[in-house]
């Protein structure tokens, strides 16, 4: 899609004759932004707009432009697009709103557009878009007058809105390229990512995502690119009301946020949760090396700010490192005898004595940089505009003299006071240092750099769903009880031995063959929450008890027993109850679930989800991330459960998930974990009906 | 302490002869800040400093100043202070560092200073302080050249550092008064709060707190003041490492943050967690009325920003209100037929048609303001510096014409784009509207306004500890088992019936009298975690079983049974296990604790803490805030526990806590809750030893 960011020739269709204030004239914006390529304008009335010759018909244009930008009323978009295809134009940006973002008719029009484009092997960006911006060559399709940076940043944005590029100072900081994919009727995140992967002007990629389709392809692409170019994700529509609004804004289907989060984390992508976070993180990736350990050196002009820094670092799971010897030897002796240095290094009392605060700061930063036990640095710097304090305004030379290029450590500076803008300008050109206006933002930048460092250590994984077997789905939409357990057993998921019985005699025989104690359960579609309703009897030790129990449950159920309806007789196990499951996510497909099981499952909500399939290591990680994990490893003297078998069972479960794309939901509750192994005791499968 | 903020005469002791860049000369700063009162300077060498006559001795000064500002070396501070007291000076600000913030000798010097001051009924601010700043009259004791606002804000800061006032643009926004209480050796938060309560120039109070003493007096004062002047708390040292650093910074003892949070919330004070949050919250309280309901009107130029706003509002527990009829009637008809308005109101498609975005925005905001089903408003506004977009730059008149004074609703504006500073200046003078530079900050401001509105509805409460009885503490440092239960019973806390026995015969008799089933427990100081170690036998149904159980436990314990050591025979109850307790907090004194009990207590950490005493309503709130509360109200068909008895037991427990200030710790685990009532089954009390 180089033609879109750097067309040799572009045609604008739907340019207004109005120009100037409030006209939102795309041609005017393009001229002001400084584009030097060939621009054609089509308009029903001949003449000129802004000195530009106007063609009455597209056919009259003497060449085939790379790109058409269409901003006519929604009802005229399809015929105009067809003219473009006829002319041989292969890229369309459709600015016009009123498609899937509006009503049913809009949705129909959008589908017709895509069909027409596919027919001609043409691609569409939008509709409902501001299109693209390229600060390197001055090309833009925005109807807003964007400020153009003389020194574009290697940061590219892919958004589902034009608002972020319009307010990029507020949302992102400096930007080199941007594309608003709008309703993403045709071109989506994956295609743009593939372009940016190859683009030498892009070093960092920011994604504003309302909803995704093709979740697996997205993850595969983003994971691959992220290993060389950081991919930063600002996902919106994470609240229930926000998700609802995303559906009407760009027609985006928003899946469950917990699953999106798990997927993004597993792919090692960086996630941000606010516009400020987005700017701060992009600045960190643009200017700083990664943070390769948790130990931070802290330089501060005030004990109070040192404490604020410790609080903020602790939220990022970072710690203050040991005080370097060279700081103790060089900086401390210059201070008052009673001032013992720690990390945070409080420089003010020393600065008051020596009169040269910045020299001390530089000695301290150099000490941190040189020390192998410090991984990164945060420095609080006062920046006051008063001429009396010009001596503590850190100059460009202050930062250059640190020779940050010799060390592979990030330095974040938290500037405060009315001269902070000045000092930030002083450090902006120096690589290896980034300036923030609050301690918390500076600490968060370090956190993002550390999380990325950790994420890049992950082994590569395959995101495509490849089933090892391809069995047919059952014909029944619902599988319960013994039938469900037998289905699981076929995938090597251990299940408790049991038999569905229809008479007291059968029940007694089943108990004798499984061994006592046993448990009896009503199995029927009407009895899903059987334990809450007394439909389960535990701990039966004798044949008489089994017969009596059978009769009690038969009476309670008030059902005729036959076929899949009856009383299940199971060997009773004692151990920890877990919940295991599968869920089909609208974005990412099969997801597996593990959590604290039994009747209190919903109370604690101690559940972890990840995309299927998982390997053994990932299955172990899932289990270990549960809050109730200690119950499995030998809590307060209890024997540990068989973790290896549990993890292996999760792997088998995930293979089942992959093999059955039409499985909508599977619950194993409980899976009983003992020191000897684990066994599914009850299960339920729901299949998608077409 | 009016003398401190507005002294008729002040004497500076320890002013350097050096002036200008890097001199940190307090006299110079005072002159530049514009103070017009009488200033005396004492210096061992006569002459002039900055045109000011120098007195060689304090005694030579022709009047008694209200205030002395001392900045001599730490070893000379005490003699200088004593000279001041001799002269009759009653207020001292001690700038000098190196006291409790440094070493043991510093701590001793600080104590000597306080003793000397008390002796003369004089008061000390500091040491280790920047002192005070008063932008109204130009008085400051700072050694830093502070910018002085020509129009001081009614916001006063009490801090444990000078850094916040030095960088107030970064930390607080506009400020009228500030005091750094430094080590708070003498004057603390309470005294300053009492002054600010009476101060007509103070409307909002910001507190930067590292550590508190006299927690109850502080809460009493802050709660009272907060009902008329918002008290906003920025607590630092909340992480373990931060708390450790606070101890060495100002010698502040930092209690447990969960308890500090509970205390602040119960007193209805506003809390912030970062410097940005502090500024944003102060701006909200300075400029906006409270938010009196959860329903927000949202006006946006972009669907994407509307979604971001919904996400942000949802984090603040706010919701989008219904679309007002007058917006549907007035705004919607101006747009394209396919554009159906919702809340968030997306104005862009309509603005492109009408060409007057700001008029639509104003109609929309007016619609929200007038509608009784909307409680507050968030408005995203583009602000672009391009001359082509001057038509969408909201002018001062835009905001004035909303007549916000007629409505009692907060309007927060999220500005984006390179013209945002301009628009913020335009709205700054208009009351009822506040401008933020991100959607999340604007939404958070609304959240703070709503939380304050809710907090002000709390009934007043008494924060002083008044014991209803004043019984002696037990002479034993540790009370366990039956003795502990008997102690609880004296405070009307229901306890399970049981008897400590020393022989199998005694045990059998005890079981017969309590009724079966019973439980046996080893009681001995070495057997605190008895259930983990097999020291408990449950569910004994017969005399033989009791005798056999007794012998097994006796063998297991390997202890001679006599006095408080033996086997406890208790009636066995079945129900929900809770944990109840008392803890002495270093800042706030007795705290009561309630949580999910039994062996999984530590796993789930489902525990709530609040200051003792509590009334019935507060006890009910405590229980209801537990994650495991549903277990008490009838979880999945189980019968509900006796909530009234539980709450009443918490009230009794809190009375016990108040009656015994030397109680260090009390645990009831478990307290068994059944539908009929609740009973303490096991308890442990630890007393402070003096």
Image (tube, coloured by chain):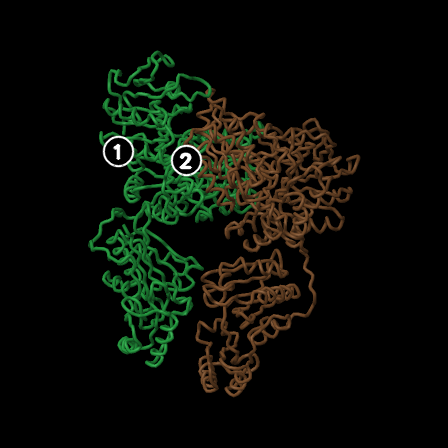
Chain colours: A brown, B green
Horizontally, residue A400 falls left or right of residue B180, namely right
Is B518 in front, or is B220?
A: B518
Can you tell which of label 1 and label 2 is closer to the viewer? 1
Task: Identify the image quadrant of residue A580.
Answer: bottom right
N-terminal of the pair, mark 1 or mark 2, is 1
**Residue B657 visible:** yes
Q: Is residue B322 visible?
A: no
**Disc 2 packing (10 Å; few <14; some 14–19; many ≥20):** many
Q: Residue at x 42, y 59 (%)?
A: B602
Q: Nearer the viewer, residue A21 or B154?
A: B154
Tell me where residue A24 appears, x and y as whole percent.
61, 33
Task: Point out residue A598 in the picture as x, y percentages from the top left corner.
Answer: 48, 68
Specify the quadrant of the image occupied by residue B157: top left
Towards the viewer: B428 or B363:
B428
Residue drawn at (31%, 72%), measured in percent from left and top?
B569
x and y, in percent, of residue B299 in the image: 49, 41
Is residue A401 positioned above or below A452 on the image?
A: above
Height in image: A563 above or below B473?
below
Say what secondary structure mark 1 lies in.
helix
Q: Is residue A470 above or below residue B278?
A: below
Question: Label for residue B115?
Answer: 1
Residue drawn where x is 46% and y is 61% of the image: A604
Q: Which residue is mark 2?
A: B283
Mark 2 lies on a secondary structure that is: helix
Q: CA distance from mark 1 to mark 2?
A: 41 Å
Farthest residue in the right direction? Answer: A62
Q: Chain of mark 1?
A: B
Q: Where residue B339 sits in the image (x, y, percent)?
A: 56, 45
């Amino acid at each position: 899609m180089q033609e879109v960011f750097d067309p040799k020739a572009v045609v604008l269709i739907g340019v207004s004759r109005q120009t100037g204030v409030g006209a939102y004239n795309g041609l005017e914006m393009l001229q002001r932004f400084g584009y030097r390529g060939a621009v054609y304008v089509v308009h029903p009335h001949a003449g000129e707009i802004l000195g530009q010759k106007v063609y009455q018909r597209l056919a009259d244009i003497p060449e085939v432009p790379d790109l058409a930008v269409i901003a006519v009323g929604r009802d005229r978009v399809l015929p105009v697009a067809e003219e473009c295809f006829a002319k041989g134009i292969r890229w369309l940006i459709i600015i016009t709103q009123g498609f899937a973002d509006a009503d049913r008719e809009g949705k129909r029009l959008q589908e017709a557009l895509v069909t027409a484009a596919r027919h001609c092997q043409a691609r569409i960006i939008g509709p409902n878009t501001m299109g693209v911006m390229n600060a390197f060559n001055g090309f833009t399709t925005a109807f807003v007058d964007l400020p153009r940076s003389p020194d574009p940043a290697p940061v590219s944005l892919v958004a589902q809105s034009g608002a972020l590029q319009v307010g990029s100072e507020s949302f992102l900081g400096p930007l080199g390229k941007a594309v608003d994919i709008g309703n993403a009727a045709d071109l989506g995140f994956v295609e743009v990512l593939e372009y940016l992967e190859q683009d030498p002007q892009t070093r960092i990629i920011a994604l504003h995502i309302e909803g995704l389709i093709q979740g697996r392809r997205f993850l595969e692409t983003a994971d691959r690119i992220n290993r060389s170019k950081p991919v930063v994700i600002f996902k919106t529509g994470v609240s229930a009301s926000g998700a609802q609004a995303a559906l009407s804004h760009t027609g985006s289907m928003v899946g469950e946020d917990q699953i999106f989060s798990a997927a993004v984390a597993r792919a090692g992508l960086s996630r941000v949760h606010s516009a400020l976070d987005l700017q701060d993180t992009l600045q960190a990736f643009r200017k700083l090396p990664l943070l390769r350990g948790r130990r931070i050196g802290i330089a501060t002009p005030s004990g109070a700010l040192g404490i604020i820094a410790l609080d903020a670092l602790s939220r990022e799971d970072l710690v203050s490192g040991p005080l370097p010897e060279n700081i103790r030897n060089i900086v401390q002796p210059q201070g008052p005898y009673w001032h013992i240095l720690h990390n945070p290094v409080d420089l003010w009392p020393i600065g008051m004595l020596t009169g040269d605060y910045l020299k001390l700061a530089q000695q301290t930063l150099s000490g941190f940089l040189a020390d192998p036990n410090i991984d990164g640095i945060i420095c609080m710097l006062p920046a006051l505009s008063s001429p009396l304090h010009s001596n503590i305004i850190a100059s460009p030379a202050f930062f250059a003299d640190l020779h940050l290029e010799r060390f592979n450590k990030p330095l974040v500076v938290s500037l405060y006071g009315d001269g902070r803008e000045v000092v930030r300008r002083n450090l902006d050109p120096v690589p290896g240092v980034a300036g923030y206006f609050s301690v918390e933002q500076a600490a968060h930048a370090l956190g993002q750099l550390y999380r990325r460092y950790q994420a890049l250590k992950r082994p590569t994984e395959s995101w495509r769903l490849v089933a090892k077997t391809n069995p047919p789905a059952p014909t029944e939409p619902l599988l319960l009880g013994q039938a469900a357990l037998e289905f699981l057993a076929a995938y090597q998921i251990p299940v408790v031995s049991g038999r569905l019985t229809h008479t007291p005699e059968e029940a007694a025989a089943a108990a004798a063959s499984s061994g006592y104690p046993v448990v009896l359960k009503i199995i029927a579609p009407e009895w899903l929450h059987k334990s809450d309703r007394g439909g389960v009897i535990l701990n039966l030790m004798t044949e008489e008890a089994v017969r009596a129990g059978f009769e009690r449950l038969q009476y309670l159920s008030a059902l005729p027993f036959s076929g899949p309806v009856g009383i299940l007789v199971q060997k009773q196990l004692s151990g920890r109850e877990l919940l295991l499951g599968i869920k089909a996510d609208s974005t990412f497909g099969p997801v597996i679930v593990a959590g604290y099981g039994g009747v209190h499952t919903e109370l604690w909500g101690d559940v972890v989800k990840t995309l299927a399939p998982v390997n053994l290591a990932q299955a172990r990680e899932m289990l270990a991330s549960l809050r109730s994990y200690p119950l499995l490893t030998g809590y307060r003297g209890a024997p540990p459960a068989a973790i290896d078998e549990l993890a292996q069972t999760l792997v088998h479960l995930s293979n089942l998930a992959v093999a059955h794309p039409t499985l909508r939901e599977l619950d194993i509750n409980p899976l009983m974990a003992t020191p000897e192994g684990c066994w599914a005791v009850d299960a339920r499968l729901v299949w998608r009906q077409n």
